[in-house]
Image: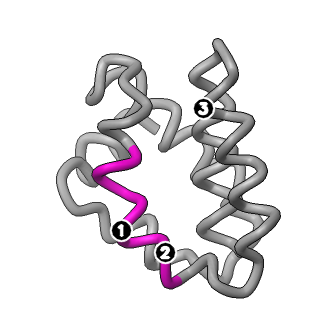
């Protein structure tokens, strides 16, 4: 998994190559958790600034549910829930 993260730092094509494959939800959540913790030093807002603009188009079909997860993640003391919320938005 670490090799994957190093490969995808910056503008990760990995995230957008798997949009239709729900089996990758867990991997996406792990990716976003890793990005938040390592690349963005647990700064949820920086993580959102990086990825949310690219995900907005992908969440139009299930906007309400994805936003609920995101709101919960921003209020949560855990940085793990932000990865779950962003991964959900990819598959929305």
* Residue that appears at 18% across and 53% down: 10
Question: Which disc, if any, is residue 74?
Answer: 3
Q: Residue 59 sits in which quadrant?
A: bottom right
**Magenta residues (range):** 48-57
User: How many angstroms separate mark 1 from mark 3 (CA)?
Assistant: 17 Å
The answer to whether the residue labelled 2 contacts the one labelled 1, judged by CB atoms less than 8 Å apart, is yes
User: How many angstroms separate mark 3 from mark 2 (CA)?
Assistant: 17 Å
**Which residue corresponds to mark 2?**
56
Front-most of 13 and 4?
13
Query: In x, y percent, where is residue 41?
Result: 31, 18
Density class for disc 2 (Cα within 10 Å; few <14, some 14-19, many ≥20) is few
* Residue that appears at 36% across and 24% down: 43
Query: In x, y percent, where is residue 34?
Result: 44, 30
Q: Secondary structure at mark 2?
A: loop
* Residue that appears at 58% across and 53% down: 86
In terms of sequence position, does the residue under pointer 3 or pointer 2 come before the other? 2
Question: Which disc, if any, is residue 53?
Answer: 1
Q: Secondary structure at mark 3?
A: helix
In terms of sequence position, does the residue under pointer 1 or pointer 3 come before the other? 1
**In the depicted structure, whether residue 24 falls above or below residue 68:** below
Density class for disc 3 (Cα within 10 Å; few <14, some 14-19, many ≥20) is some
């Amino acid at each position: 998994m670490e090799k994957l993260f190093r490969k995808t730092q910056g503008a990760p094509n990995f995230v957008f190559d798997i949009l239709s494959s729900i089996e990758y939800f867990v991997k996406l959540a792990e990716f976003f958790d890793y990005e938040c913790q390592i690349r963005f030093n647990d700064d949820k807002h920086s993580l959102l600034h990086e990825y949310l603009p690219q995900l907005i188009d992908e969440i139009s079909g299930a906007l309400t549910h994805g936003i609920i997860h995101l709101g919960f993640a921003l209020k949560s003391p855990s940085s793990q829930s932000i990865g779950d919320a962003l991964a959900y938005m990819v598959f929305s």
